[in-house]
Structure formats: C-alpha cells, structure tokens
Image: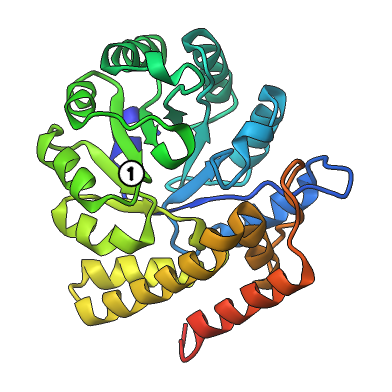
Amino acid sequence: MTSQQIIARLRGIFVPVVTPFDRRGEIDLGLFRENLRRYAGIGLSGIVIAGSTGEAPFLTERERLRLVGIARALVRPPELLIASTGLESTLLTLRLSREAVARGADALLVITPNYYKSRMDSSALAAHFKTLADGLRRPIIIYNIPQFTGIRMDPSTISQLSRYPNIVGLKESSGDLAYVRAILRRVRPGFRVLVGAPSILLDTFRAGAVGGVLGQSGFVPEICLGLYDAFQKRRMKTARGLQQRLMLLAQKIAAPYGIAGVKAAVDLCGYAGGPPRPPLLPLKASGRRAVAAALREARAGLEF
C-alpha cells in the first residue's frame, strides 16, 4: 500500500498483540502465528507488533524484527501491520525502523524516549521525531503513554509535529480526556488520533479520535469491534453498554494484574497468551480465577 492508502486505513480497532513465550522465556513463534491467523479477517483494522501489551521493553531488536517478518506473511491488506520501533536514541530508533520497513511494516509506532526524562523537553522530542520523519519512508505514529514513560508531551508540541511530513498520527494512552481533547483541538485536519484507554473511548470519538488500540481487543475483539460499529451507526446506547463492559475488564484485569492479567485473559478466551517474560511474574491461581470471573461478567448476555 502507498503511504496515503495506509493513512486512510488508520481508523477503527487495532489489536496490540501479545508475545507468547515458552517456559524458558523464548518466543513461541508457532503460537504467535496462530494468534495472527485467528485475528485475520474478523474486522480489525490491523495489528500492532511489540507494543506495551507485546512486552516491547523485554524484546531484543532482532526479536522485534523477526515478529514483523512473520506477521507480514499473515497480515493481509487492507489490514495494517504497525511495528513498534521506539528506542532511547534517535539513531537506534531510525535503524530499527528502517529494518522494520524492510520486513514489511506499513507504519511505525514510536514511543517517546524517557530514560533521561528530565532532558526530554519539547525541543528534544520535536527534534527526535522530525529526524525520524526525514529519514523514513513510512508513516510514523507518535506513542504517548506517560504512565509508563513519565513523559507527557505538550499538546502544542504534538500540534507542531502533526504538521510535519510523514508524522501522521498519535496513539494516546494516558486516559486523560481533557488532555486528549486539547490535542484534538490543536492538530492539523486529517491527523489520526488513536486512543488506548477504554474509559474515554466514546468521548474521544465524539471529539475527533478515529479509533482505538485496545489491549482488550486481544481477547474480546467482538466487544471492541461492536463498540466501534455501534458508534459509527450512532447507536449510542449500544456503544455505551459495550464501553462499560470494556471498562469492567480494564478495572478488573489490566489495572490489578497488568500484562500477566491480559495474557491470562488471552489464554482463557482461546488465544495463546502464555506467561510474561521475567522479571514479570505469571498470575497465581487466585488471579486467574479473578480474571475468569471478570470475563464471564463482561460477556454475560452478549450474542456475538
């Protein structure tokens, strides 16, 4: 696909896929492939490789690229393949991004550098993303997740970057509705804002966001897709009801248990989650029971 075709497809629901590991902590490529086959053709707009849900900080650059190459053979247009390629330095991010593009990534999700967070002011972040945009041929999506990075990009900086060639969107995962609205008021028309927090999803859709990158779509894609479809058809009562179900899952799985909880939910819904990579610990039996109960509650009465 051309860059313009990719940008046009940056809307709807994207699944940030988990990375299945075996008991030794190595990636189980067979289970990874099986998950992608099950996600194909069900209405998702695409997948995200090696995001936060995919345990990006625990993956080597070589592993990320291997996953992108495998995914490219299974993710067919018009579904998009988005690769998370953000590293701490501009040079290393540029190199990894170019390699991901060579292996078939349609777009690149780039997290804000954060180790030297006291120096990551607006000037440093703007220079970082502009250099990447100048050096890459595929669209770039800024990834803002301050609860993990400690970096909260100023809306004016995002607005400035939205007018720069090849920076086409933002994945915004703070969960702060006022902040997202401030961004949406400032960015250029056509700039794609994707939201990662179920609690504000419908409100951000009303304000101009075009889609979501939701961890819950990895185990209950039918609820996420149903919500988006209901919003598009202005069936707001249905959309609000489905959002409540997603919020329940966020509150009872992701919030208390993190990645281990999400991967347990993936397992319990018939996909392949497996244990997280150490130092993250798998859920205890009591945690898995709580996740199973939350899933039953959230899916009760659905007729998908």
Residue 267, percent from left and from top = 70, 66
Residue 13 spot, x, y in % from top left = 39, 56
- Is 42 above or below relative to 258? below
Residue receiving disc 1: 10
**Image color mode:** rainbow
In this rendering, is residue 39 above or below 74?
below
| Residue closest to the far bottom | 301
Q: Is residue 62 left or right of residue 146?
A: right
Q: Which of 237 and 249 is in front in this view?
A: 249
Q: Residue furthest right?
A: 24
Residue 120 position in % (x across, y down):
37, 17
Side (left or right) of 34 relative to 11: right
Describe residue 111's horizontal placement relative to residue 206 as left or right: right
Residue under the image location 52 percent in, 34 percent down? 83
Q: Compare residues 55 and 254 and report the one nearer the observer.
A: 254
Tally of numbered tags: 1
